[in-house]
């Protein structure tokens, strides 16, 4: 009963003051300054920020530092002990009389791009406006000038429009709005923009440990990920962990003519396809021994929140163009609470115009393991390796396979895994969590969505582990943003909504 009452309080928090006076004032401010806001954002998007591009990352960090300076905030570059790692761009605002400190997080690095996969006319780092989504028939339009109205349903196409330069911009634009409206934040504000998230935040722990005193706070608010598929704003209390693996299967030492040697020489592409197929059943359940064994069950309150999430499965199947989903009839929201195994890529010989009648020498698959609370990244990797061994494979980490190994083992697989990171979840019962819900709810009339965990991954366990500080994620991007893929985009209204959300969060 206690949990039921608390859930009701969480889900109805702020409904009486829906669309507060502050939200209406923020909206009026934005409507008067849309062109200026959009220009600054497009400037940020135009800087290449692929996580492995050192020069682009440095330029992006410098642009954000200048954004802080323009708002009267002294920017600092926080580094760990390892040289050559992208710094976190940091700034802080001390508020007289404030009794709470909140850190606002987003990341400024982006995923790698293959320009050839983007739609004709689109270039990842030349942001362009479209009248609507590409798959809805959207067409490119000229950038507005001289007070021309900006349609909130326009899309901006370019790398990191949604993941996660939108987060950087929404946070800083929100603080600027408070300055212009002469509204004082209610908490001390700290801004932390990471530059290595898309590479797994490998050195984030070093930055957090080195600057532990500077980063002391009561809460981290994370701006990353999409709003709910219904378009409703949502508050997320956790994230899944993530670890990536590469599996490479070997056969003959040289490619073979498929006519002369087919039906005799082993085909590594077929071998790998069978190996991967042995890992999941037709409903998408992972068949690897113990894969689900160490999952931490949801609390009663989290289960109740999950049950109240609006169903979107029918909408998404139609939108995405497939009939049957995995999961044996379970909803998307339910399945996001389970660990997953995904094939991100499969490579062997050539296809299309480059296809040749050969039996290839090897085949490679990139695997992505999403983790939930209770899973350990390396333990989950070992479960996959044990499964590969159980299928008769000799497993090595070496790229070069010796003649002796080829003579001894009929099935050889090279398996390499990254370090990865574990999942994190903040209790929904925390008083500060209820305060966040009220702030977000105050910006809209409709009831917001509360989710125990985001489907995507962030290294938020580090904030628990190193700083002993809770995190709550408040995303702003549209759900159909194509993050991590070609034609990434952001719906402009989501940017404006994000501005209103983060103004409210700075007045917790």
Image (cartoon, rainbow, N blue to C red):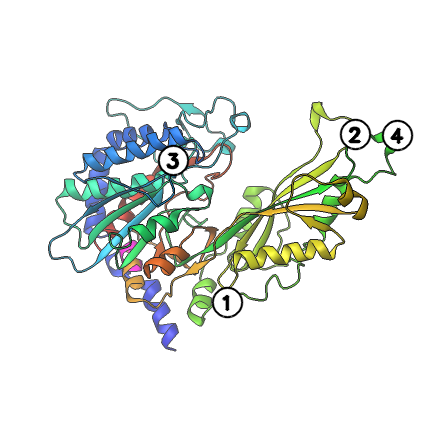
User: How many residues crowd around disc 4 within 10 Å: few (fewer than 14), some, or many (20 or more)?
Assistant: few
Q: Nearer the viewer, mark 2 or mark 1?
A: 2
**Vertical arrangement, residue 99 with respect to residue 413, above or below:** below
Residue that carries the numbered disc 2 in the rendered image: 358
Q: In terms of secondary structure, where does tag 1 sit? A: loop
Residue 315 coordinates in the image, percent (x, y): 53, 48
Residue at 75 percent of width and 48 percent of height: 274
The answer to whether mark 2 and mark 3 are in CB contact below 8 A is no
User: How many residues crowd around disc 1 within 10 Å: few (fewer than 14), some, or many (20 or more)?
Assistant: few
Residue that carries the numbered disc 1 in the rendered image: 296
User: Which numbered disc, 2 or 4, marks the residue that appears first in the sequence?
Assistant: 4
* Front-lying residue, 7 or 90: 90
* Labelled disc at residue 153: 3
User: Which numbered disc, 2 or 1, marks the residue that appears first in the sequence?
Assistant: 1
- Give the CA distance from mark 2 to mark 3: 49 Å
- Give the CA distance from mark 4 to mark 3: 58 Å
Q: Nearer the viewer, mark 4 or mark 3?
A: 4
- Give the CA distance from mark 2 to mark 1: 47 Å
Magenta stretch: residue 446 in it?
Answer: no
The image quarter containing residue 281 is: bottom right
């Amino acid at each position: 009963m206690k949990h039921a009452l608390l859930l009701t309080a969480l889900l109805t928090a702020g409904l009486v003051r829906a669309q507060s006076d502050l939200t209406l004032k923020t909206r009026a401010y934005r409507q008067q300054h849309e062109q200026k806001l959009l220009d600054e954002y497009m400037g940020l998007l135009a800087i290449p920020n692929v996580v492995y591009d050192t020069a682009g990352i440095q330029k992006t960090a410098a642009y954000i530092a200048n954004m802080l300076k323009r708002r009267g905030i002294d920017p600092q570059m926080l580094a760990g002990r390892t040289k050559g790692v992208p710094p976190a761009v940091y700034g802080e605002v001390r508020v007289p009389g404030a009794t709470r400190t909140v850190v606002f997080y987003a990341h400024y690095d982006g995923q790698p791009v293959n320009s050839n996969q983007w739609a004709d006319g689109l270039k990842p780092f030349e942001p362009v406006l479209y009248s609507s989504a590409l798959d809805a028939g959207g067409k490119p339009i000229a950038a507005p000038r001289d007070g021309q109205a900006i349609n909130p349903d326009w899309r901006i196409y370019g790398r990191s429009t949604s993941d996660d330069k939108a987060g950087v911009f929404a946070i800083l634009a929100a603080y600027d709005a408070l300055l212009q409206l002469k509204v004082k934040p209610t908490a001390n504000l700290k801004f932390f923009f990471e530059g290595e998230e898309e590479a797994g935040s490998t050195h984030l722990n070093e930055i957090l440990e080195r600057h532990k005193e500077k980063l002391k706070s009561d809460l981290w608010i994370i701006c990353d990920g999409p709003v709910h598929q219904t378009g409703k704003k949502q508050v997320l209390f956790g994230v899944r962990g993530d670890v990536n693996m590469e599996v490479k299967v070997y056969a003959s030492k040289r490619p073979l003519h498929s006519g002369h040697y087919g039906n005799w020489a082993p085909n590594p592409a077929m071998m790998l396809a069978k190996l991967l197929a042995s890992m999941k059943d037709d409903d998408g359940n992972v068949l690897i021994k113990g894969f689900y064994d160490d999952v931490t069950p949801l609390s009663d309150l989290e289960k109740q929140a999950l049950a109240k999430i609006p169903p979107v499965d029918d909408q998404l199947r139609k939108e995405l163009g497939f009939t049957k989903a995995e999961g044996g009839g379970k909803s998307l929201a339910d399945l996001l609470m389970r660990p997953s195994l995904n094939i991100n890529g499969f490579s062997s010989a050539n296809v299309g115009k480059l296809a040749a009648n050969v039996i290839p020498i090897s085949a490679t698959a990139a695997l992505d393991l999403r983790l939930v609370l209770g899973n350990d990244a390396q333990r989950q990797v070992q479960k996959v390796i044990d499964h590969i061994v159980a299928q008769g494979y000799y497993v090595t980490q070496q790229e070069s396979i010796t003649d002796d190994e080829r003579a001894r083992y009929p099935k050889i697989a090279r398996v390499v895994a990254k370090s990865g990171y574990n999942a994190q979840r903040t209790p929904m019962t925390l008083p500060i969590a209820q305060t966040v819900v009220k702030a977000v709810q105050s910006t809209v009339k409709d009831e917001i969505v509360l989710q125990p965990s985001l489907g995507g991954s962030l290294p938020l366990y580090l904030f628990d582990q190193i700083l002993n500080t809770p995190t709550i994620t408040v995303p702003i991007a549209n759900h159909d943003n194509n993050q991590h893929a070609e034609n990434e985009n952001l719906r402009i209204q989501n940017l404006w909504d994000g501005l209103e959300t983060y103004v409210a969060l700075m007045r917790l």
